């Protein structure tokens, strides 16, 4: 029966992991906008991020 | 014809490659494409330069028109006080800003705005929330500041709207986020405790191994702690506050139920008498939170919080006198103009307000004459003339040429601002004894009854058996926990809110629906509410003229910017051959012109003295035009008669008002003169009171008087800023809106203009909504009675209670949702 104790512990860990992931993503705003992603899927290219290091390489348009 | 010297190819119209507007094939051309204007051509090149050509594949030929902003435009956004309103986050390396962009309307907009970093290297990230029409930018520092971003957005055709704060929606989603977090934890504990209690469900004694048994029990208690301490914490805090204030609220018996459930479970587990009800406890909290989540439903695209301040501009052109310090840019100009935030305006400052701009504060007119449209303030649809030295009140809109004004009061002290702000203060004072919802009113009787029963049972048992006495006490408190009420109220009201939105009736929150159900008295505004905002077609009944005379008058009218002239010019026949020899327009009085030798005079009724100075003042409403929207026409000194423009009444209003009259006390408050009163007077029942020539202040006072002597409350139905203070003063303010993007003053509900004739059905539905609550309450009392009898007879096994309690919550959930749906169907709202 000891195996049950281990299994309970493992399942609880797994559950807590998912709970943590859910709350983390929820705080990040993963679920706050449920419409715009359906539009983003239409675009062929992905928007790249400007990072501070790239600023010099890019030529300013405006 | 005028266009004789143009080549035939110029007449071929092609859509502009950027905005899709029709333009000449040989007009502005770039890269073999035709454009309607230089601005479009520039944006087109800019977008291609940034390798974003896919935009044009996505947007199907209609892009927003762009505008080239001037170098200095939006510089007022540097003002730290204004800037703070838009910046969400700021540190040494970057800042985040969120902007409301009403132009976002399709996938292409999202495509372009989310690639904004290609236009400007200092923008690090751009993200669009389509439904909220919000753009979030992460910008490197030191780099592009707000004015530069604003100019870029205006240039590509997405001007941000500065008046609307995006922060409101964020606060709202904050409550929602909190509920979801609490629900996640309650749901997690609910599932896991049930899993751990599985052995208890299957056999009476749980697991045979004592160690395992004890540890699973301990784990259950451990898991239920966050549910009680965190997920259910709101019930405890509100119950405590209510208890301190000696108010009975629904939260008190709920908090009591949860606390007793938890303590009794601990006691049972601790002493080994039973296995407790921790699973039911977490399920209960989970379902209660689910109900709350339902209640927090919000409409992303609507702004209920827009107050008068969002109607006013953030900045205004200030004319700097020549004695102010000169810089490089203004050298050589005697007076130069800069944009300053309106909170910086002082008495004595001179400002310039352009066509269609809103006057930010009470001021004196410096130019010789001007036209001001006070429709937002007074509801009067016609522009008002004013002359040098007249006092002009904040809230008016300039019609026609730009005006030079001298500020007499800082913006915050303007007459209307004071009126509105004063009301805010009164509201805050009234908050403590605010409205009690239906559920809270039931709880008022319910809670003492439950506590009495529990105490009587306890006292009755105490002499015989102390343990049984405590058991009875806790059992009654647990079973009688009014979770049915707590669940059913938010669910039925929240679902009702959702269903009403399909009839274009958007309610701010569930409490507003609850209040609306008990309204006794409806107050209507006339202009813009019962009638449409635009005036109807020209009525020629009272005039006799020939086609030739009509075209002569048209030739005169098309030169004027007066709204009535414009409408006449639109409805009269056009003849380009007429030559105007003389043209003299007296703003707001009329036009004196000579066309092809004929002397044409159009204007107000002759009885009105043209020289008389018209003092505009809406404090003691002097209707600016006793003749309303009539225009008298003279040709060669002979009066032909007059044309007039009547308001268009909304469809089916007569019928709707008849129906509403059966249930409600009706009132009409109109800023207009009683001329149209005769026409709509018979719509209203004879006992209804109709009032005309009401200023915003009168309307507000009337509503306040009315709501003091009517117990059920007063609903005001109106539109525009002129009703704003009345809408606020009423128990329920319903704003009428033509389209969802339009400005609507602070209110409790927004109703689309074309749905106004559905109002009787909407109100009938709202009146019957509390029935759903009563049905569910009866149902759960029966349910609990059965449960109580099980509990008292000692036959309530852990399995039975584990099924019983969540099942009762679930049935209440489903019945609330389906009953509201049925009601909506019954009133033909779906």
Image: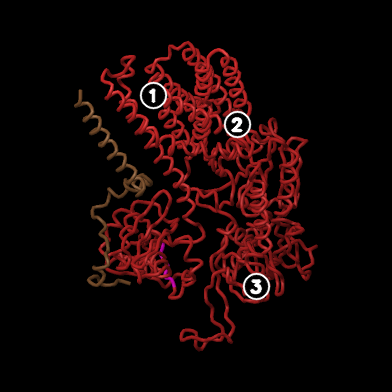
Chain colours: A brown, B red
Element at label 2 = helix
Front position in the image: B476 or B444: B476
- Does residue B68 belong to the magenta stretch? yes
Q: Secondary structure at mark 3?
A: strand
Q: Earlier in the sequence, mark 1 or mark 3?
A: 1
Q: Is residue B329 above or below residue B404?
A: below
Q: Nearer the viewer, residue B270 or B813?
A: B270
**Which comes before the other along the chain, label 2 or label 1?**
1
Give the label, 2 or 1, closer to the camera. Answer: 1
Q: CA distance from mark 2 to mark 3?
A: 50 Å
Discs 2 and 3 carry the same chain letter: yes
| Residue position marked by numbered label 3 in the rendering | B407
Q: Which residues are magenta?
A: B65-69
Residue at left offset 54%, top offset 19%: B781
For the residues marked 1 and 3, what is the alpha-carbon distance in whole angstroms? 75 Å
Q: Position of residue A6 (x, y in %)?
A: 21, 30
Left or right, B363 with respect to B15, comes to right
Q: Are marks 2 and 3 in contact (CB under 8 Å)?
A: no
Q: Is residue B481 magenta?
A: no
Dot 2 corresponds to which residue? B438
Whether discs 1 and 3 lie on one chain: the answer is yes
* Residue B269 numbered mark, or none: 1
């Amino acid at each position: 029966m000891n195996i049950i104790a281990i299994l309970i512990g493992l399942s609880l860990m797994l559950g807590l992991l998912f709970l943590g992931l859910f709350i983390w993503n929820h705080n990040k705003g993963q679920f706050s906008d449920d419409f715009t992603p359906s539009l983003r899927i239409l675009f062929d290219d992905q928007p790249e991020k400007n990072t501070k290091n790239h600023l010099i390489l890019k030529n300013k348009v405006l | 014809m005028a266009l004789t010297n143009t080549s035939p190819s110029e007449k071929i119209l092609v859509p502009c490659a950027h905005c899709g507007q029709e333009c000449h094939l040989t007009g502005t051309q770039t890269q073999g494409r035709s454009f309607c204007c230089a601005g479009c051509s520039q944006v087109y090149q800019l977008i291609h330069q940034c390798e974003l050509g896919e935009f044009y594949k996505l947007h199907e030929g209609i892009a927003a028109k762009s505008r080239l902003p001037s170098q200095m435009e939006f510089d007022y956004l540097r003002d730290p006080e204004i800037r703070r309103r838009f910046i969400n986050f700021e540190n040494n390396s970057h800042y985040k800003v969120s902007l409301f962009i009403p132009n976002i309307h399709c996938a292409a907009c999202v495509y372009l705005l989310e690639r904004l970093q290609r236009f400007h290297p200092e923008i690090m990230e751009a993200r669009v929330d389509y439904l909220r029409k919000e753009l979030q930018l992460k910008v490197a520092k030191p780099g592009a500041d707000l004015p530069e971003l604003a100019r870029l957005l205006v240039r590509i055709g997405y001007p941000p709207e500065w008046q609307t704060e995006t922060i409101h929606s964020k606060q709202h989603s904050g409550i929602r986020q909190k509920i979801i977090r609490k629900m996640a934890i309650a749901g997690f504990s609910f599932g896991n405790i049930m899993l751990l209690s599985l052995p208890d469900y299957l056999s009476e004694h749980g697991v045979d191994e004592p160690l395992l048994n004890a540890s699973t029990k301990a784990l259950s208690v451990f898991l239920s702690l966050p549910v009680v301490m965190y997920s259910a914490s709101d019930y405890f805090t509100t119950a405590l506050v209510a208890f301190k204030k000696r108010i009975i609220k629904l939260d008190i018996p709920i908090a009591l139920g949860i606390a007793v459930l938890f303590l009794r479970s601990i006691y049972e587990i601790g002493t080994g008498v039973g296995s407790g009800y921790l699973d039911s406890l977490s399920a209960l909290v989970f379902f209660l939170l689910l109900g709350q989540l339902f209640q927090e439903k919000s409409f992303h695209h609507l702004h209920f919080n827009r107050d008068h301040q969002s109607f006013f501009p953030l900045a205004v052109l200030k004319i700097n006198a020549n004695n102010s310090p000169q810089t490089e840019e203004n050298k050589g100009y005697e007076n130069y103009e800069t944009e300053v935030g309106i909170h910086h305006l002082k008495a004595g400052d001179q400002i310039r307000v352009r066509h269609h701009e809103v006057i930010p504060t009470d001021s004196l007119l410096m130019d010789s004459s001007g036209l001001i449209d006070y429709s937002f303030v007074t509801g009067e649809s016609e522009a008002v003339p004013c002359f040098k030295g007249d006092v002009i009140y904040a809230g008016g809109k300039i019609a026609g040429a730009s005006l030079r004004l001298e500020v007499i009061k800082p913006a915050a002290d303007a007459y209307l601002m004071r009126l509105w702000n004063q009301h805010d203060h009164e509201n805050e004072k009234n908050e403590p004894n605010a409205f009690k919802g239906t559920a809270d009113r039931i709880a008022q009787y319910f809670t003492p009854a439950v506590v009495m029963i529990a105490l009587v049972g306890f006292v009755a048992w105490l002499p015989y058996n102390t343990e049984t006495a405590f058991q009875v006490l806790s059992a009654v408190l647990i079973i009688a926990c009014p979770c049915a009420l707590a669940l059913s109220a938010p669910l039925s009201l929240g679902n009702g809110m959702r269903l009403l939105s399909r009839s274009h009736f958007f309610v701010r929150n569930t409490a507003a629906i609850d209040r609306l159900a008990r309204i006794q008295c409806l107050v209507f505004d006339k202009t813009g509410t019962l009638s449409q905002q635009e005036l109807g077609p020209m009525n020629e009944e009272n005039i006799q003229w020939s086609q030739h005379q009509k075209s002569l008058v048209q030739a005169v009218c098309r030169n004027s910017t007066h709204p009535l002239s414009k409408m006449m010019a639109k409805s009269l026949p056009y003849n380009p051959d007429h030559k105007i020899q003389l043209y003299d327009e007296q703003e707001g009085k009329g036009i004196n012109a000579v066309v092809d030798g004929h002397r044409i005079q159009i204007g107000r009724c002759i009885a009105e003295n043209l020289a008389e100075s018209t003092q505009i003042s809406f404090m003691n409403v002097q209707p600016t035009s006793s003749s309303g929207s009539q225009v008298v026409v003279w040709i060669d000194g002979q009066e032909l008669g007059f044309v007039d423009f009547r308001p268009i009444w909304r469809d089916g209003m007569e019928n709707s008002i008849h129906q509403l009259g059966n249930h409600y006390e009706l009132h009409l408050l109109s800023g207009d003169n009683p001329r149209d009163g005769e026409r709509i007077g018979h719509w209203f029942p004879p006992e209804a009171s109709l009032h005309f020539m009401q200023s915003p202040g009168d309307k507000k006072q009337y509503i306040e008087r009315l709501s003091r002597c009517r117990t059920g409350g007063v609903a005001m139905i109106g539109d525009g800023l002129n009703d704003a203070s009345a809408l606020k003063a009423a128990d329920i303010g319903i704003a009428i809106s033509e389209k969802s993007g339009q400005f609507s003053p602070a209110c409790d509900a927004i109703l689309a203009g074309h749905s106004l004739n559905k109002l009787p059905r909407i109100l009938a539905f709202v009146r019957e909504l509390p029935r759903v609550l009563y049905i569910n309450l009866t149902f759960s009392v029966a349910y609990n009675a059965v449960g109580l009898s099980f509990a008292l007879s000692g036959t309530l096994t852990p399995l039975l209670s584990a099924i019983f309690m969540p099942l009762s919550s679930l049935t209440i959930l489903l019945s609330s949702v389906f009953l509201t749906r049925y009601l909506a169907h019954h009133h033909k709202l779906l």
